[in-house]
Amino acid sequence: MGRGRQKAKHTKVARELKYFSPSTDYSALEKELTKAPGSEEPDYEDKWADLYEDEGSEEDQSPKS
């Protein structure tokens, strides 16, 4: 395939992506974004935190010259 045909194909795909607008289910989005009043979830939970030491612990243990 020549460069001209390849460029035309890429242009066609880019144009399709630019003007593509899927239908949005706003009620499902609202349910996902709003919290239930009784549910208490942590804002952020680091599931890998127990595998690594804190960054400050290395500085405290390093010898000073």
Image (cartoon, rainbow, N blue to C red):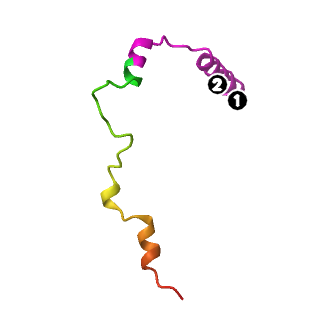
Q: Is residue 18 magenta?
A: yes
Q: Decide whether the magenta segment is chiefly helix, strand or loop.
A: helix
Q: Position of residue 41 (x, y in %)?
A: 31, 36
Q: In this view, does 39 lie to the left or right of 9?
A: left
Q: Which is more toward the observer, 54 or 6?
A: 54
Could you tell me if residue 20 is visible in this image? yes
Which element carries disc 1, helix, strand or loop?
Answer: helix
Residue visible at 37% across and 19% down? 31
Query: Which quarter of the rendering shows the C terminus?
Result: bottom right
Q: Is residue 51 left or right of residue 5?
A: left
Q: Which amino acid does label 2 sit on?
A: His
Q: Mark 1 points at which residue?
A: 3
Residue visible at 59% across and 20% down? 17
Could you tell me if residue 25 is visible in this image? no
- Counting residues from the start of the chain, the first of labels 2 and 1 encountered is 1
Say whether marks 2 and 1 touch (CB < 8 Å). no
Q: Mark 2 points at which residue?
A: 10
Q: What residue type is labelled 1?
A: Arg
